[in-house]
Image (cartoon, rainbow, N blue to C red):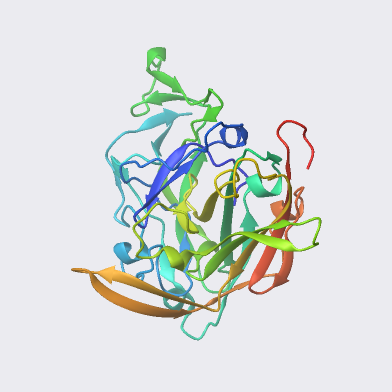
Amino acid sequence: MRKHKLKTSVFAVASTSLLFLSATAFNAAAAEPPVPVEEEEISNYLSVPAIFAEGYGLGGLPAVDDRGAGLPGSSEASFTGNVYCYNNTEYYFQLDDTNSWQAEWNTADGFLGADFGLVPVTVDWSDEVINTQWNDKSVIPIGVSLTTDLSGYGSMSEYQMKDLTGLSLQTGICLDGDMDTSLFMTLEEEEGEVADKWGTNSFTKESDTAGVYSVCARLTIQKYDDITGQWVGVYDSAVYEGFGVHARPTWYSATIDGPGKIVYLYNWNLALHQNSPDVDRSGKYRLTFSLDDFADYTTFEGKMEQIDRHVERNTMLLETLHPSDALGVNTPVYVSPTEMYVEIDIIHLETGEE
């Protein structure tokens, strides 16, 4: 995962809506805890190739088509809508439904073969976890992505993406000669929030790596109790526990970020998920990403047809750390092929102490 901040964008994937704010906004003190904002269903498009390890998509359905994969857009790309020019190259924004694209995706069986075995993945924690200091009033976006090496098995096509934040762009197609400066717009930081704008030039290239999605992923948050010397549970959820549930999203889930990669994300609101505003929320916390051995859940299809599913894990975590994680302030600890954790310190907003 590129170490960029998770900026302001709203994504709806697998029928859920999640609010992403900048690290600056997340880390500010707030009298009232923020709540997820319901928005019209819109999502970033997949730009990085994806492998569905167990053969099931973002909503728990068999990944046999775009609907089952839970992906917006289509492999039949359409670039007929809004276009912006930068450095004489035309770009199309994420979160713009006037255009549509989709990187190559497949199931592990479909791409690697049914006899391949467990899909090996490198875990990449977001910069918000690895390098950002948080206080006891924070809302922390805990992002995790999984990547696998396709070398020896082929390649998959991806869309060329660029971070356009802060750049001066001309609206409309690129024109030769002088351009009217009134047509220029700049995407920049405003009031502590950043307009995170990623776009594609509509061209594809081959990649020998791919993102991986597993329905067996789980996030656990624990706080260290200085008195008992024990880790006390704060949050525990697997992605499959949210399948088929139509309620306010508090479970672990996955979405597509600005660069177009599938990312597991949980927006951890310390004030909201602790006992009360008066409870001391500073201290040491352990964030554990793990893979359950199997996922049991129910999906509803057609005219509310209920289907009970049992999915065996087909993913394993590699011991090798992602290069950016290995050099971070909070270094991940590998436990086993199904578990890895990061410990972070939460300080008092007023005193700056744990």
**Which residue in the rendered view is the most extreme toward the left?**
303
Q: Position of residue 12 (x, y in %)?
A: 37, 49
Question: Which of the pair 258/201 is nearer the observer?
Answer: 258
Q: Is residue 285 above or below residue 310?
A: above
Q: Is residue 76 left or right of residue 205?
A: left
Residue 151 at x, y percent in the picture: 58, 69
Which residue is at 41% across, 76% downward?
110
Question: Is any atom of residue 10 visible in this view?
Answer: yes
Q: Nearer the viewer, residue 235 or 26?
A: 235
Q: Is residue 297 above or below residue 156?
A: below
**Picture quarter containing residue 335?**
bottom right
The correct choice, above or below, for 193 with respect to 143 in the image is above
Question: Can you give x and y, in whole percent of width and height, for residue 311 in the image?
Answer: 44, 79
- The image quarter containing residue 247 is bottom left
Residue at the image position 28 percent from the left and 39 percent from the top: 98
Residue at 68% x, 58% y is 322
**Nearer to us in this view, 285 or 146:** 285
- Residue 44 seen from this side: no
**Is residue 49 found left or right of 71 in the rendered image?**
right
